[in-house]
Amino acid sequence: MSTEKHSSGHGTDGAPFHESVTFEPRDINVATVVKQLIYLAITIAIALLICVPVLKVLTSASQSEDTPMAPVRANISMRNSVPPNGSPAGSAGKDPS
């Protein structure tokens, strides 16, 4: 810590005054923040315009190369699926013990 005495106070226009420190009249420029938010929105929109079509192309390519599920397996999957109430399809009304 410095023991040197500083003469700080306010200038004639009410702004803080110190000999070795300068103060900005405003800490933030609203126009700059708004511009940066606009640039961010534009960048996100461009990224979406690129990524969404790429995703669609890759999804369709993946689906076209997948082999379809065998009909026997599809029937087994449907019978063993869990209904919305959380109990297995074949256990309605059965005692859980």
Image: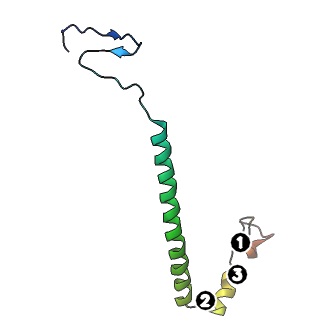
Identify the residue at horizontal 48%, vertical 64% (top origin): 47
Relative image position of residue 17 (x, y in whole percent):
32, 14
Q: Amino acid at mark 1?
A: Pro
Q: Work out whether mark 2 precedes mark 1 in sequence or the reverse, and give the earlier one.
A: 2
In what quadrant of the picture does the C terminus appear? Answer: bottom right
Closer to the observer: label 3 or label 2?
A: 2
Identify the residue at horizontal 63%, vertical 88% (top origin): 73
Q: Amino acid at mark 2?
A: Met
CA–CA distance in space, label 3 to label 2 = 12 Å
Q: Which residue is mark 3?
A: 78
Q: Which residue is mark 1?
A: 88
CA–CA distance in space, label 2 to label 1 = 22 Å
Q: Work out whether mark 1 precedes mark 3 in sequence or the reverse, and give the earlier one.
A: 3
Identify the residue at horizontal 70%, vertical 71% (top origin): 82
In what quadrant of the picture does the N terminus appear? Answer: top left
Relative image position of residue 33 (x, y in whole percent):
47, 42
Q: Quadrant of residue 20?
A: top left
